[in-house]
């Protein structure tokens, strides 16, 4: 029994832990969090040598070469597992140091041999993988895993008894599996990935049907992609329709990031079949499904990053854009163990946001055309108020898709070109995603095509409002000479002061001679000015900028 002096140690995958951070009950279990994936907790060379010793691996015969390999930390995110496999498999031992240098092809080759010569064992691993890394007699007695399908894929008798599978499972304890109270698990999460990808290369249809939407979006790649890693599954063109059907099913289950934030729908054949499924589905009303507010969304975004990272990190910019996609009512920040993070909540989502933000122009045009054919006002697509329209325009810029941006510009108020989604009644600590205008986002994304489109709209290149820094200063801080030149050509004042900073002084401070020389040519063309809104920004506001050092 636990008492006041008891200490409870829990282990969890990081993705599961981050999702659970939303729930207050977890606070009782997070007095101290130790992240094995953190750079500061990375295994040292001495740690690895100690692990080798713990598995009674004799390094003396290959001491010099092995010492060198052990020092190469970038190939050892699963070093303890490699040691375990090495110590229990004679074939791996014969490989010597080459096993530690390139473990994936060796393990994949071993699975190839198992698939051909020990089919029951291979089928057992696949069944374990399909049940999220767990297998037991109870699992096999239920319909949790599609045994008949897997038996057919693995070429074993459909009449195979459960006890035969469990006998194979028990013989893999200590190598691929570990046991706890009659349940068997992979000895390492990475084995789940390896078995899934090995099986998927031979049976992609079953992977598309059976795996999670997250796995499909992360591990599947299309036939026209030249590179294929060991932990990816290349899908041939004959599977494209099936993949489109799976994506359409995930859409109806609101797996929105897995569906839209992936390469798949940008493929013409997959995208066209997906759109044909949508157009033929009589159970979905376009207006209600894509354009109405939805509060059932559960796939909230979570971000966690080391505190040492600067706030102009790509990770934070994309996180904040996802907050805008979700139209998050609140963003909760937390700080612990020298890391900070955030997650969204109280979201009032519209599915159209994902379509705009991830650049699905054909789908967006289809929805617009449907509303026009129904004689609906297009305000229902892009919003009736200026804030909603501005939000759509910023998301369009985030997509980096010129056609999306042009379509949104065509159907939104021109005032939105110079706006962000901040409302005056909100507090001083404004989330960054509410500060970004279409112009500033095109600069932050270094998207020349989108910047050109926005500048063609005759935006005020000297306005910055609550964002504190002028667009010109943002470009200078990013050492982006091309953008600086475009802004000045569009009328940016090289002598304008914002946040008590002048463009020429900042360029000099950053030792960017090209920008300084360019600015010096224009510095006498305008008199120094105060900030456009006549206000002085606080240091607190500066700290919340994605582009301020």
Image (cartoon, helix red, strand yellow):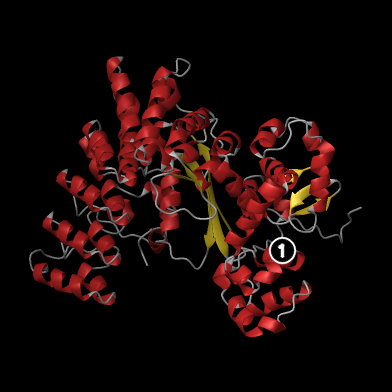
Q: Residue at x 31, y 14 (%)?
A: 374
Percent x, y for residue 371? 31, 20
> In screen coordinates, is 343 left or right of 79?
left
Camera-side residue: 335 or 468?
335
**Percent position (x, y) of residue 89?**
74, 64
- Above or below, comparing residue 370 to residue 498 in the picture: above
Find residue 290 and report its horizontal and vertical position in percent: 42, 27
Residue on which disc 1 sits: 85
Asked if 231 appears above or below 297 in the picture, the reply is: below
**Which residue is outermost to the right?**
1
**Vertical side of 329 occupied by 285: above or below:** above
Q: Secondary structure at mark 1?
A: helix
Q: In front here: 313 or 424? A: 313
Does residue 390 appear to the left or right of 246 in the view shown?
left
Above or below: residue 380 compared with residue 452: above
Residues 256 and 73: in front is 73
Q: Quadrant of residue 418?
A: top left
Q: Position of residue 39 (x, y in %)?
A: 57, 69
Q: Residue at x 80, y 54 (%)?
A: 173
Q: Nearer the viewer, residue 329 or 507?
A: 507
Image quarter hosting the C terminus = bottom left
Residue farthest toward the front in the current orientation of the protein = 117
Is residue 133 visible to us here? Answer: no
Q: Which residue is situated farthest in the left direction here?
A: 525
Q: Residue at x 13, y 54 (%)?
A: 490
Q: Residue at x 22, y 49 (%)?
A: 449
Circle 1 Cα neighbour tier, 10 Å, few/some/many (<14 / 14–19 / ≥20)? many
The image quarter containing residue 54 is bottom right
Could you tell me if residue 171 is visible in this image? yes
Q: How many marks?
A: 1
Left or right: residue 501 compared with residue 17: left
């Amino acid at each position: 029994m636990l008492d006041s002096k008891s200490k409870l140690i829990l282990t969890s995958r990081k993705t599961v832990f981050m999702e659970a951070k939303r729930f207050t009950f977890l606070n009782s279990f997070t007095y101290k969090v130790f992240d094995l994936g953190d750079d500061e907790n990375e295994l040292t060379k001495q740690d690895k040598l100690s692990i080798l010793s713990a598995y009674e691996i004799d390094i003396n015969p290959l001491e010099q070469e092995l010492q060198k390999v052990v020092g190469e930390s970038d190939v050892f995110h699963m070093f303890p597992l490699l040691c375990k496999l090495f110590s229990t498999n004679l074939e791996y031992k014969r490989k010597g140091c080459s096993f530690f240098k390139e473990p994936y092809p060796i393990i994949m080759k071993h699975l190839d041999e198992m698939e051909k010569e020990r089919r029951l064992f291979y089928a057992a691993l696949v069944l374990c993988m399909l049940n999220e890394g767990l297998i037991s007699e109870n699992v096999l007695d239920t319909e949790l895993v599609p045994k008949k399908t897997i038996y057919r894929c693995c070429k074993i008798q459909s009449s195979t008894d459960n006890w035969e599978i469990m006998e194979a499972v028990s013989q893999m304890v200590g190598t691929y599996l570990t046991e706890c109270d009659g349940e068997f698990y992979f000895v390492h999460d990475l084995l789940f990935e390896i078995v899934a990808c090995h099986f998927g290369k031979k049976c992609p249809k079953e992977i598309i049907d059976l795996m999670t939407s997250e796995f499909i979006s992360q591990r599947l790649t299309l036939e026209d992609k030249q590179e294929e890693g060991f932990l990816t599954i290349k899908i041939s063109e004959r599977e494209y329709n099936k993949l489109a059907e799976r994506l359409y099913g995930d859409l109806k289950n609101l797996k929105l990031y897995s569906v839209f934030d992936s390469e798949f729908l940008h493929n013409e054949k997959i995208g066209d079949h997906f759109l044909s499924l949508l157009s033929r589905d009589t159970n979905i009303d376009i207006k209600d499904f894509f354009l109405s507010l939805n509060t059932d969304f559960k796939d909230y975004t979570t971000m966690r990053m080391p505190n040492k990272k600067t706030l102009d990190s790509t990770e934070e910019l994309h996180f904040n854009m996802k907050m805008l996609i979700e139209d998050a009512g609140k963003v909760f920040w937390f700080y612990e163990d020298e890391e900070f993070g955030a997650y969204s909540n109280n979201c009032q989502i519209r599915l159209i946001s994902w379509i705009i933000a991830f650049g699905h122009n054909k789908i967006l045009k289809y929805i617009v055309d449907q509303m026009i054919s129904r004689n609906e006002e297009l305000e229902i697509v892009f919003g009736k108020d200026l804030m909603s329209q501005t939000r759509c325009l910023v998301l369009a810029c985030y997509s980096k898709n010129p056609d999306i941006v042009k379509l949104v510009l065509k159907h939104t108020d021109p005032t939105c070109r110079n706006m962000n989604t901040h409302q005056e009644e909100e507090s001083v600590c404004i989330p960054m995603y509410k500060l970004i205008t279409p112009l500033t986002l095109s600069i932050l994304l270094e998207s020349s095509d989108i910047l050109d489109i926005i500048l063609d709209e005759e935006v005020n290149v000297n306005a910055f409002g609550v964002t504190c820094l002028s667009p010109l200063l943002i470009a200078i801080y990013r050492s982006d000479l091309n953008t600086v030149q475009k802004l000045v050509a569009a009328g940016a004042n090289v002598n304008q002061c914002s946040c008590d900073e002048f463009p020429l002084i900042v360029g000099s401070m950053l030792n960017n001679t090209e920008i300084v020389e360019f600015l010096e040519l224009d510095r006498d063309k305008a008199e120094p000015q105060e900030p456009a809104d006549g206000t002085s920004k606080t240091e607190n506001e500066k700290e919340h900028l994605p582009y301020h050092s």
